[in-house]
Image (cartoon, rainbow, N blue to C red):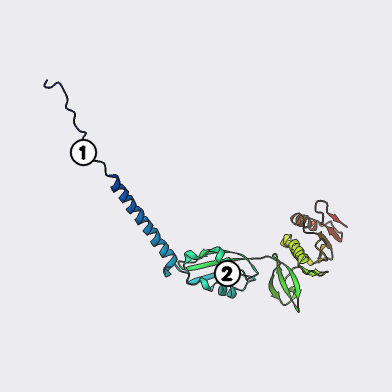
Amino acid sequence: MSGSGQRVGAPETGGGVLQMPRPPRRRRLRGWIAAGIGVLMVAALLAVLYLTPLLSVRTITISGTRLADEAKVQALLKDYVGMPLARVTSDGVREALSSEPAISDIRLGLDGPSGLKVTVLEHREVAVMAAGEGFVLVGDNGAKLKTLSKRTDRQLPLVKLDAKDPDGRIFDTVVHALAQLPAAVLGQLETAEASSVDTVTFSLGDKRTVVWGDASEGELKAKVLAAMLKDKNLKDKVIDVSTPRTPLSK
């Protein structure tokens, strides 16, 4: 019957052309090509970063040195000149400077497109110790940081050990105690002495004596001592913080 039915045909696109699905093999091939191009681009970028002299270290700027010799630090880092910046690491620079006792840590930064900036962090000075005919500056790590010509070159306590110390334990205990003290207290001390690891004492410039004791609770002892030294009414000649929760004076 004419006019009574509808003809069913294939679906058409807006342009009237039937879109056939792409073969899976062609899609995979294009994916592999794209991945290969990506790998080549990454490889080229790494080659530029790690191999090209355009991004290599040409200058090294040192800052923060007070105790360490800047010229010596430069000499220890000479092998980094010409090295690609991408290969310079903090651990590598620390290792290169490990022979410098005054250096405790470093920070790296860029100084222009081809400059390396090394900021040096040094150990804190805590004491002076006699060495031959002169003196040495002792750091909070127990290392001898610098040679001094005179005792008065630093307003720091003079370390005196009243016993043989073959393994250095007494010395380490004294240094550990001094390292706990704030600068305001450290500057008031004349000497730091010990005959054993349990008998650390300090003498102050006003002739008072501080009994520190052993290495335990050092941070608390330092806080208690600082508070007692600020007390203008405290006239006793001996300040005992060896048991910091129950300090004594006499």
Give the residue at mark 2.
96
Q: Residue at x 16, y 22 (%)?
A: 5
Q: Residue furthest right?
A: 250
Mark seen at residue 18: 1
Decide which of tag 1 and tag 2 comes sooner along the chain: 1
Residue 176, given in percent of the width and then of the height, sits at 74, 62
Residue 173 shown left or right of residue 57 in the figure: right
Image quadrant where one finds the C terminus: bottom right
- The quadrant where residue 103 appears: bottom right
Q: Residues within 10 Å of mark 2 (few under 14, many from 20)?
A: some
* Helix, strand or loop for disc 1: loop
Image quadrant where one finds the N terminus: top left
- The quadrant where residue 198 appears: bottom right
Q: Closer to the camera: disc 1 or disc 2?
A: 1
Residue 89, given in percent of the width and then of the height, sits at 53, 64
State the residue in front, 139 or 19. Answer: 19
Q: Residues within 10 Å of mark 1 (few under 14, many from 20)?
A: few
Q: Residue furthest front?
A: 25
Q: Residue at x 19, y 28 (%)?
A: 8
Q: Report the Cα–Cα distance between label 1 and label 2.
A: 70 Å
User: Could you tell me the amino acid type at mark 1?
Assistant: Leu
Q: Residue at x 70, y 75 (%)?
A: 147
Residue 26, given in percent of the width and then of the height, sits at 28, 48
* Helix, strand or loop for disc 2: helix
Q: Are marks 1 and 2 in contact (CB under 8 Å)?
A: no
Q: Residue at x 29, y 47 (%)?
A: 25
On screen, residue 150 above or below 195: below
Q: Residue furthest bottom?
A: 133
